Amino acid sequence: MKRIASLGCLALISCVPKKVDSGFRAFEAAYFKALFEASPAYGTASGLHEYDARLDDLSRPAIGRRIAALKQQAGALQAIRAKGGLTKAETIDADFLANRIQSELLDLETLEIWRRNPMAYVSVAGGAIDGLMKRNFAPPLDRLRSVTSRVRGVPALMAAMRANVENPPKEFTDLAIRMAGGSVGFFKATVAGWAKGAAGGDAAALAEFEQANKAAIEAVETATAWLKTDLLPRSKGAYAIGEANFRRKLLLDEMVDAPLAEVLATGEANLERDRQAFIETARKINPRATPLEVMRSLSAEHPGEKELLDSTRATLDGARRFLIEKNIIPIPSEVRPTVAETPPYARSGSFASMDNPGPYETKATEAFYYVTPVEAEWDARHKEEHLRAYNRPAMEVITVHEAYPGHYVQFLYSPKFPSMTRKVLYAASNAEGWAHYAEQMMLDEGFGGGDPKLGLAQLHEALLRDCRYIAGIKLHTAGMTVAEAAKIFVERGFQEPANGFEEARRGAYDPTYLYYTLGKLMIYKLRADYAKQQGTSYSLRGFHDAFIREGSIPIPLIRRILLREDRGPLF
């Protein structure tokens, strides 16, 4: 009887269909290997240290090879999808990767960013080297050797810029000059100072670094001079990518295919709602002053140059504590991010940012919450207007965006992301949309205790993103100038003139920076639909946990996961 039973079990087992390997996960691994080979700095940033000794090759032949590789991958992935047999999770990731491949091809072949934007060159080396210095994933001497190897690649990178970049927009060259000038000081002081300590008495290693660094400094200084005296006078190119390319970027990057007129109308309506709410909130604070006067009185309470970092640090614990007390979202770690100045090579218009370790980093897991200081060459008025953006209520909101429950909490969730695609890649409307959604959601849940000043600061941040939404579309599809876009920020968004200009100029090189507000609107719509589906079992904590654990994939894909293949309206 036992033998018969065993034979019966074997028969049943043999009848169970075997799972067929679709081949997608092998393709996924090959895709990322090729990506990191093309951009070793991206590999290091992802926490994979076999790429540490190499710097990105942005020469024209290397770009040609990357285009060829992407086209081959596009064909291979198309064949895998056509064959079928993908799991639901594989289908989601395959859809994301297919769009990502086409998006990179759009940038390289159609928009030719590598020919139009010198910033793409001057920013690479600083980030690639800074990541090796500040993250203690290996002994300092080992990291010094990798730094030296990457520093050796700087002259070739600067040579590639001079060979490739032709007639960029003036706005791009202006920012590249700022970034390159800051990078000279970065190599001379920051990198050189770190290297002396990292060498630990190894004179040969230090001498090898110093020789390479000397050549790198000379190359960046030469490139800076070239940017100023050669490229800038002939920087007369157009930054606008045109409506067709704008719509294609929106589809490929965020999977939003709504008509552009509808997208713009949605942004205009949201800007007006937030503007009216801003005016009403300002009246609560001081009914005798104009909204702009109220905002200026609030922003006058800002830190000085030397207090900027300390004032930022002071906001972290309150936001984190609120999440726990109100059961907003699980926080997977007790570790706080490190507050620091934005490195010079990264000061391209951002006021604050979060630099998280890569998803595959196992040792150096520090996260850096960056705030951008004033520049030494700015006049007193420019410095004052810049610092006004860091007033106390605004910093509370910025910390919500960057840290709790914004980008830092997203990073803390990354070990739970279910695939390499979702760990390494992201859609901005999800990543930035989540952080921007968090600002409003936190106040909706009572953060700040109903303080109208905090409410005004949150609305000021919302208006900033609303203005980005409108400016980005009109800069690239309606012939708007940067000066005209700056007026939108000042007149409709109540921004300081200097900050309005910086924001408008960012729109010239970041066409779809509508993704903050667009993402927030899509998340609110998804939340409402999810609550309706869940009924009495719905909770805000449950929604947040379900949303963020899927990774920062395009929100239409999140809808398909959480709402049973829903493909309805996004906002």
Image: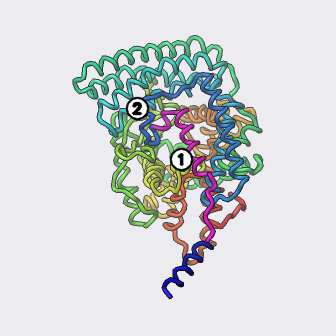
Q: Where does residue 378 sit, x and y in percent of width and height?
A: 46, 24
Observer-nearest of 345 and 22:
22
Answer with the quarter of the image where residue 473 lies: top right
Secondary structure, mark 1, is helix
Residue on which the image places disc 2: 130
Residue range of the region highlighted in magenta in the rendering: 16-43
Is residue 67 shown above or below 283? Answer: above
**Is residue 489 rendered to the left or right of residue 439?**
right
Q: CA distance from mark 1 to mark 2?
A: 29 Å
Is residue 546 shown above or below 234? Answer: below
Mark 1: give few (<14), some (14-19) or many (20+) Cα within 10 Å.
many
Residue on which the image places disc 1: 461
Q: Where does residue 292 sit, x and y in percent of width and height?
A: 55, 43
Residue at x 42% of width, y 14% of height: 215
**Is residue 221 rendered to the left or right of residue 62?**
left
**Res. 381 in view:** no
Amino acid on which disc 1 is placed: Glu
Q: Residue furthest left?
A: 201
Q: Nearer the viewer, mark 1 or mark 2?
A: 2
**Res. 553 in view:** yes
Observer-nearest of 330 and 159:
159
Observer-nearest of 423 and 83:
83
Residue at x 71% of width, y 47% of height: 78
Q: Where does residue 166 sit, x and y in percent of width and height?
A: 66, 18
